[in-house]
Amino acid sequence: MTDSTTASRVVIRKEGALGRLTLDRPEAINALDLGMIEALTQALTAWVDDSDVQIVVIDGAGERGMCAGGDVRALHTQIVAGRADETAAFFRAEYALNAMIAEYPKPVVALADGITMGGGIGLAGHAAIRIVTERSKLAMPETRIGFTPDVGGTWLLGRAPGRFGEYFALTGATMTAADAVHLGFADHVVPSDRLDALREALAHRADPTGPSEIVLLFDETPEPSRLPAMREWVDEAFSAPSVVEIVERLRARDEPDAGATADLLESLAPTALVVTLDAVREARALSGLRAALEGEYRRVLWFVDEHPDLVEGIRAQLVDKDRNPKWDPATLDELGPDAGAAAREYTPRHPLF
Protein backbone atom coordinates (compact mmCIF):
# COMPACT_ATOMS: atom_id res chain seq x y z
CA MET A 1 0.00 0.00 0.00
CA THR A 2 1.23 3.47 -0.88
CA ASP A 3 0.15 6.59 0.99
CA SER A 4 1.35 9.65 -0.95
CA THR A 5 1.13 13.42 -0.67
CA THR A 6 2.97 16.26 -2.39
CA ALA A 7 4.00 19.29 -0.38
CA SER A 8 5.95 22.22 -1.76
CA ARG A 9 8.00 20.29 -4.33
CA VAL A 10 8.54 17.30 -2.07
CA VAL A 11 6.68 14.03 -2.68
CA ILE A 12 5.99 12.38 0.68
CA ARG A 13 4.75 8.81 0.75
CA LYS A 14 4.77 5.57 2.65
CA GLU A 15 5.55 2.33 0.85
CA GLY A 16 5.49 -0.73 3.06
CA ALA A 17 7.95 -0.12 5.89
CA LEU A 18 9.44 2.83 4.02
CA GLY A 19 8.85 6.54 4.46
CA ARG A 20 10.02 8.06 1.19
CA LEU A 21 10.90 11.71 0.65
CA THR A 22 11.53 12.70 -2.95
CA LEU A 23 12.71 16.18 -3.86
CA ASP A 24 10.51 17.13 -6.82
CA ARG A 25 12.03 20.08 -8.58
CA PRO A 26 13.92 18.32 -11.38
CA GLU A 27 14.05 21.38 -13.64
CA ALA A 28 16.42 22.94 -11.06
CA ILE A 29 18.15 19.65 -10.13
CA ASN A 30 15.99 19.72 -7.01
CA ALA A 31 17.56 22.88 -5.59
CA LEU A 32 16.21 23.54 -2.11
CA ASP A 33 13.94 26.40 -1.14
CA LEU A 34 12.46 27.08 2.30
CA GLY A 35 9.18 25.34 1.51
CA MET A 36 11.00 22.13 0.58
CA ILE A 37 13.05 22.25 3.78
CA GLU A 38 9.91 22.78 5.86
CA ALA A 39 8.12 19.90 4.11
CA LEU A 40 11.02 17.53 4.77
CA THR A 41 11.18 18.62 8.40
CA GLN A 42 7.45 18.18 8.96
CA ALA A 43 7.44 14.69 7.42
CA LEU A 44 10.42 13.54 9.46
CA THR A 45 8.85 14.96 12.62
CA ALA A 46 5.60 13.10 11.96
CA TRP A 47 7.35 9.81 11.22
CA VAL A 48 9.31 9.69 14.48
CA ASP A 49 6.25 8.23 16.23
CA ASP A 50 4.72 6.50 13.19
CA SER A 51 5.13 2.76 13.73
CA ASP A 52 4.41 2.08 10.04
CA VAL A 53 7.62 3.87 9.06
CA GLN A 54 10.70 1.85 9.96
CA ILE A 55 13.16 3.27 7.41
CA VAL A 56 13.31 6.66 5.67
CA VAL A 57 14.66 7.12 2.13
CA ILE A 58 15.58 10.54 0.74
CA ASP A 59 16.04 10.82 -3.03
CA GLY A 60 15.49 13.22 -5.92
CA ALA A 61 13.26 13.28 -8.98
CA GLY A 62 14.67 13.31 -12.51
CA GLU A 63 17.82 11.92 -14.05
CA ARG A 64 20.25 14.75 -13.36
CA GLY A 65 20.78 14.54 -9.64
CA MET A 66 19.49 14.25 -6.11
CA CYS A 67 20.01 17.92 -5.23
CA ALA A 68 22.21 20.64 -6.71
CA GLY A 69 22.16 22.63 -3.46
CA GLY A 70 20.25 25.55 -2.07
CA ASP A 71 18.42 27.97 -4.36
CA VAL A 72 21.21 30.55 -4.54
CA ARG A 73 19.37 32.67 -7.12
CA ALA A 74 16.65 33.24 -4.55
CA LEU A 75 19.35 33.94 -1.98
CA HIS A 76 20.83 36.60 -4.27
CA THR A 77 17.41 38.23 -4.72
CA GLN A 78 16.79 38.33 -0.98
CA ILE A 79 20.14 39.88 -0.11
CA VAL A 80 20.00 42.49 -2.88
CA ALA A 81 16.47 43.44 -1.80
CA GLY A 82 17.58 43.92 1.81
CA ARG A 83 15.69 40.87 3.09
CA ALA A 84 18.59 39.33 4.98
CA ASP A 85 16.31 38.14 7.79
CA GLU A 86 14.60 35.82 5.28
CA THR A 87 17.99 34.49 4.28
CA ALA A 88 18.94 33.83 7.91
CA ALA A 89 15.63 32.03 8.46
CA PHE A 90 16.38 29.78 5.49
CA PHE A 91 19.77 28.79 6.87
CA ARG A 92 18.39 28.17 10.37
CA ALA A 93 15.71 25.86 8.97
CA GLU A 94 18.18 24.09 6.70
CA TYR A 95 20.76 23.48 9.41
CA ALA A 96 18.11 22.26 11.85
CA LEU A 97 17.06 19.74 9.18
CA ASN A 98 20.69 18.64 8.68
CA ALA A 99 21.01 18.02 12.42
CA MET A 100 17.66 16.19 12.50
CA ILE A 101 18.80 13.79 9.76
CA ALA A 102 22.05 13.07 11.60
CA GLU A 103 20.24 12.43 14.90
CA TYR A 104 17.12 10.70 13.54
CA PRO A 105 16.02 7.70 15.63
CA LYS A 106 15.19 5.57 12.58
CA PRO A 107 17.61 4.65 9.78
CA VAL A 108 17.77 7.31 7.07
CA VAL A 109 18.98 6.08 3.67
CA ALA A 110 20.11 8.79 1.22
CA LEU A 111 20.35 8.04 -2.50
CA ALA A 112 22.88 10.56 -3.78
CA ASP A 113 22.43 9.61 -7.44
CA GLY A 114 23.79 12.15 -9.95
CA ILE A 115 24.61 15.71 -8.91
CA THR A 116 24.60 16.09 -5.13
CA MET A 117 26.25 19.31 -4.05
CA GLY A 118 26.08 21.97 -1.35
CA GLY A 119 22.69 21.67 0.32
CA GLY A 120 22.35 18.21 -1.21
CA ILE A 121 25.34 17.12 0.86
CA GLY A 122 23.51 18.47 3.90
CA LEU A 123 20.69 16.00 3.21
CA ALA A 124 22.75 13.01 2.07
CA GLY A 125 26.03 13.37 3.94
CA HIS A 126 24.58 13.03 7.45
CA ALA A 127 22.23 10.10 6.77
CA ALA A 128 22.82 6.77 8.49
CA ILE A 129 23.29 4.97 5.15
CA ARG A 130 24.68 7.04 2.25
CA ILE A 131 24.50 5.56 -1.23
CA VAL A 132 26.15 6.83 -4.40
CA THR A 133 26.03 5.51 -7.97
CA GLU A 134 28.22 5.54 -11.05
CA ARG A 135 26.46 8.81 -11.98
CA SER A 136 27.18 10.56 -8.69
CA LYS A 137 28.99 13.88 -8.63
CA LEU A 138 29.46 15.24 -5.14
CA ALA A 139 30.98 18.58 -4.18
CA MET A 140 31.01 21.48 -1.76
CA PRO A 141 31.54 24.16 -4.46
CA GLU A 142 30.81 27.26 -2.39
CA THR A 143 34.16 28.97 -2.93
CA ARG A 144 33.27 29.14 -6.64
CA ILE A 145 30.67 31.80 -5.75
CA GLY A 146 32.68 33.62 -3.09
CA PHE A 147 31.10 31.68 -0.23
CA THR A 148 32.06 29.01 2.30
CA PRO A 149 30.96 25.37 2.80
CA ASP A 150 28.04 24.90 5.15
CA VAL A 151 25.21 22.35 5.87
CA GLY A 152 27.70 20.42 8.00
CA GLY A 153 30.09 20.13 5.08
CA THR A 154 32.98 21.35 7.21
CA TRP A 155 32.30 18.52 9.66
CA LEU A 156 32.61 15.94 6.87
CA LEU A 157 35.57 17.66 5.24
CA GLY A 158 37.41 17.93 8.53
CA ARG A 159 37.24 14.15 8.89
CA ALA A 160 38.43 13.27 5.40
CA PRO A 161 41.80 11.47 5.17
CA GLY A 162 44.92 13.61 5.32
CA ARG A 163 44.40 17.11 3.93
CA PHE A 164 41.75 16.22 1.39
CA GLY A 165 39.29 18.20 3.50
CA GLU A 166 41.18 21.40 2.81
CA TYR A 167 41.68 20.44 -0.84
CA PHE A 168 38.01 19.77 -1.60
CA ALA A 169 36.80 22.70 0.53
CA LEU A 170 39.05 25.27 -1.11
CA THR A 171 38.85 24.04 -4.70
CA GLY A 172 35.21 22.93 -4.74
CA ALA A 173 36.38 19.93 -6.75
CA THR A 174 33.92 17.19 -7.70
CA MET A 175 34.06 13.72 -6.15
CA THR A 176 33.23 10.54 -8.01
CA ALA A 177 31.39 7.74 -6.24
CA ALA A 178 34.70 6.08 -5.36
CA ASP A 179 36.10 9.40 -4.14
CA ALA A 180 33.05 9.96 -1.95
CA VAL A 181 33.45 6.58 -0.26
CA HIS A 182 37.19 7.16 0.19
CA LEU A 183 36.57 10.56 1.78
CA GLY A 184 33.78 9.46 4.11
CA PHE A 185 30.97 11.24 2.26
CA ALA A 186 29.30 7.95 1.27
CA ASP A 187 29.11 4.36 2.45
CA HIS A 188 28.03 2.22 -0.52
CA VAL A 189 28.03 2.27 -4.32
CA VAL A 190 24.89 0.86 -5.96
CA PRO A 191 24.40 0.90 -9.75
CA SER A 192 21.75 3.44 -10.70
CA ASP A 193 19.71 0.81 -12.54
CA ARG A 194 19.32 -1.12 -9.26
CA LEU A 195 17.99 1.74 -7.14
CA ASP A 196 14.35 0.85 -7.78
CA ALA A 197 15.00 -2.73 -6.70
CA LEU A 198 16.80 -1.45 -3.61
CA ARG A 199 13.87 0.78 -2.68
CA GLU A 200 11.52 -2.14 -3.18
CA ALA A 201 13.64 -4.36 -0.95
CA LEU A 202 13.84 -1.73 1.79
CA ALA A 203 10.06 -1.25 1.67
CA HIS A 204 8.89 -4.85 1.58
CA ARG A 205 11.61 -7.31 2.50
CA ALA A 206 10.99 -8.94 5.87
CA ASP A 207 14.60 -9.02 6.96
CA PRO A 208 15.42 -8.87 10.67
CA THR A 209 19.03 -7.91 9.99
CA GLY A 210 18.11 -4.37 8.98
CA PRO A 211 18.62 -1.92 6.11
CA SER A 212 22.43 -1.99 6.10
CA GLU A 213 22.45 -5.70 5.32
CA ILE A 214 19.82 -5.20 2.60
CA VAL A 215 21.93 -2.47 0.99
CA LEU A 216 24.94 -4.81 0.96
CA LEU A 217 23.04 -7.11 -1.38
CA PHE A 218 23.09 -4.33 -3.98
CA ASP A 219 26.51 -2.85 -3.24
CA GLU A 220 29.21 -3.07 -5.92
CA THR A 221 32.89 -2.26 -5.67
CA PRO A 222 33.56 0.91 -7.70
CA GLU A 223 36.50 1.68 -9.89
CA PRO A 224 39.44 2.72 -7.68
CA SER A 225 39.51 6.33 -6.53
CA ARG A 226 42.20 8.56 -8.01
CA LEU A 227 42.75 10.17 -4.62
CA PRO A 228 45.40 7.89 -3.09
CA ALA A 229 47.73 8.78 -5.97
CA MET A 230 47.26 12.47 -5.14
CA ARG A 231 47.68 12.12 -1.40
CA GLU A 232 51.38 12.99 -1.11
CA TRP A 233 51.27 16.38 -2.84
CA VAL A 234 47.84 17.29 -1.46
CA ASP A 235 48.94 16.60 2.11
CA GLU A 236 52.19 18.48 1.70
CA ALA A 237 50.62 21.58 0.16
CA PHE A 238 47.32 21.78 2.03
CA SER A 239 48.90 21.35 5.44
CA ALA A 240 50.41 24.82 5.08
CA PRO A 241 49.21 27.32 7.68
CA SER A 242 47.70 29.81 5.22
CA VAL A 243 46.16 29.94 1.77
CA VAL A 244 49.09 32.01 0.49
CA GLU A 245 51.51 29.32 1.64
CA ILE A 246 49.32 26.57 0.17
CA VAL A 247 49.59 28.27 -3.22
CA GLU A 248 53.35 28.70 -2.78
CA ARG A 249 53.79 25.01 -1.99
CA LEU A 250 51.65 24.02 -4.99
CA ARG A 251 53.78 26.23 -7.25
CA ALA A 252 56.93 24.59 -5.92
CA ARG A 253 55.77 21.10 -6.87
CA ASP A 254 56.89 19.44 -10.09
CA GLU A 255 53.36 18.15 -10.57
CA PRO A 256 50.96 19.37 -13.29
CA ASP A 257 47.88 18.85 -11.11
CA ALA A 258 49.47 20.92 -8.34
CA GLY A 259 50.12 23.80 -10.72
CA ALA A 260 46.58 23.65 -12.08
CA THR A 261 45.25 23.68 -8.52
CA ALA A 262 47.31 26.81 -7.73
CA ASP A 263 45.89 28.48 -10.84
CA LEU A 264 42.36 27.64 -9.72
CA LEU A 265 42.85 28.94 -6.19
CA GLU A 266 44.22 32.23 -7.51
CA SER A 267 41.04 32.68 -9.57
CA LEU A 268 38.69 32.23 -6.61
CA ALA A 269 37.55 34.74 -4.01
CA PRO A 270 40.45 35.34 -1.62
CA THR A 271 38.19 36.04 1.34
CA ALA A 272 36.15 32.89 0.76
CA LEU A 273 39.33 30.80 0.64
CA VAL A 274 40.69 32.18 3.89
CA VAL A 275 37.36 31.85 5.71
CA THR A 276 36.92 28.31 4.39
CA LEU A 277 40.37 27.13 5.44
CA ASP A 278 39.70 28.49 8.92
CA ALA A 279 36.28 26.79 9.03
CA VAL A 280 37.51 23.33 8.05
CA ARG A 281 40.33 23.45 10.57
CA GLU A 282 38.00 24.62 13.31
CA ALA A 283 35.49 21.87 12.49
CA ARG A 284 38.21 19.20 12.61
CA ALA A 285 38.72 19.97 16.30
CA LEU A 286 35.02 20.20 17.25
CA SER A 287 33.03 17.63 19.19
CA GLY A 288 30.08 17.12 16.87
CA LEU A 289 27.98 18.18 13.89
CA ARG A 290 25.93 20.76 15.78
CA ALA A 291 29.08 22.61 16.84
CA ALA A 292 30.26 22.64 13.21
CA LEU A 293 26.88 23.97 12.06
CA GLU A 294 27.18 26.77 14.63
CA GLY A 295 30.56 27.75 13.20
CA GLU A 296 29.21 27.64 9.66
CA TYR A 297 26.19 29.73 10.62
CA ARG A 298 28.39 32.52 11.97
CA ARG A 299 30.48 32.58 8.81
CA VAL A 300 27.55 32.30 6.41
CA LEU A 301 25.68 35.22 7.97
CA TRP A 302 28.87 37.27 8.00
CA PHE A 303 28.95 36.87 4.21
CA VAL A 304 25.24 37.69 3.99
CA ASP A 305 25.37 40.72 6.29
CA GLU A 306 28.86 42.10 5.98
CA HIS A 307 30.73 41.09 2.82
CA PRO A 308 30.01 41.71 -0.90
CA ASP A 309 31.67 38.64 -2.43
CA LEU A 310 28.71 36.27 -2.07
CA VAL A 311 26.34 38.54 -4.01
CA GLU A 312 29.05 39.22 -6.57
CA GLY A 313 29.87 35.53 -6.99
CA ILE A 314 26.24 34.53 -7.56
CA ARG A 315 25.81 37.42 -9.98
CA ALA A 316 28.82 36.42 -12.04
CA GLN A 317 28.13 32.68 -12.11
CA LEU A 318 24.34 32.40 -12.13
CA VAL A 319 22.62 35.74 -12.76
CA ASP A 320 24.56 37.68 -15.41
CA LYS A 321 26.71 34.62 -16.16
CA ASP A 322 29.65 36.74 -17.32
CA ARG A 323 32.00 34.49 -15.28
CA ASN A 324 33.98 37.59 -14.38
CA PRO A 325 33.52 38.28 -10.66
CA LYS A 326 35.15 41.32 -9.07
CA TRP A 327 36.31 40.00 -5.71
CA ASP A 328 36.92 42.37 -2.79
CA PRO A 329 39.84 42.24 -2.22
CA ALA A 330 40.99 40.89 -5.54
CA THR A 331 44.12 39.04 -4.37
CA LEU A 332 45.28 37.03 -1.38
CA ASP A 333 48.12 39.45 -0.79
CA GLU A 334 45.63 42.20 0.02
CA LEU A 335 44.11 40.28 2.93
CA GLY A 336 45.24 40.78 6.50
CA PRO A 337 47.13 38.10 8.44
CA ASP A 338 43.98 36.77 10.14
CA ALA A 339 41.28 37.59 7.65
CA GLY A 340 39.20 34.62 8.80
CA ALA A 341 38.72 36.02 12.31
CA ALA A 342 35.90 38.45 11.47
CA ALA A 343 33.75 35.67 10.05
CA ARG A 344 34.70 33.18 12.78
CA GLU A 345 33.76 35.60 15.55
CA TYR A 346 30.65 37.12 13.95
CA THR A 347 27.55 37.22 16.14
CA PRO A 348 24.31 36.65 14.18
CA ARG A 349 21.17 38.49 15.25
CA HIS A 350 19.35 35.22 15.89
CA PRO A 351 20.82 32.05 17.42
CA LEU A 352 20.96 28.91 15.32
CA PHE A 353 19.62 26.38 17.82
Image: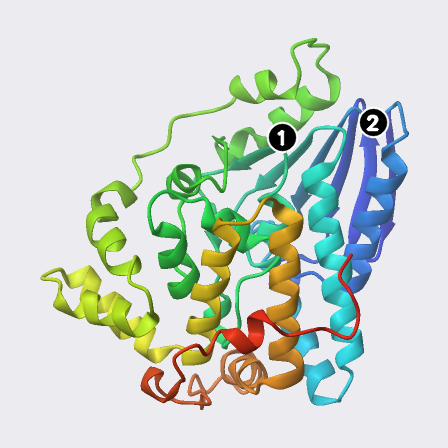
Residue at 75% in and 28% down: 106
Colour style of the rendered protein structure: rainbow
- The amino acid sitting under disc 1 is Asp
> In the visual, does 344 lie left or right of 276?
right
Depth order, front residue of 30/44: 44
**x, y (%) of residue 241?**
32, 65
Of residues 288 and 312, the one drawn nearer to the viewer in this rendering: 288
Placement of the N terminus among the 4 image quadrants: top right
> Does residue 269 appear in this view?
no
Q: Secondary structure at mark 2?
A: loop
Q: CA distance from mark 2 to mark 1?
A: 18 Å
Q: Nearer the viewer, residue 94 or 278?
A: 278
Up/down of 312 relative to 98, above or below: below
Q: Is residue 325 above or below residue 158?
A: below
Q: Residue at x 53, y 84 (%)?
A: 309
Q: Tag on residue 196? A: 1
Mark 1 neighbour density, 10 Å: few (under 14) some (14–19) many (20 or more): few
Give the residue number, with chain letter if any, for mark 2.
53
What kind of residue is marked 2? Val
Residue 160 percent across, percent down from the top left = 42, 44
Q: Earlier in the sequence, mark 2 or mark 1?
A: 2
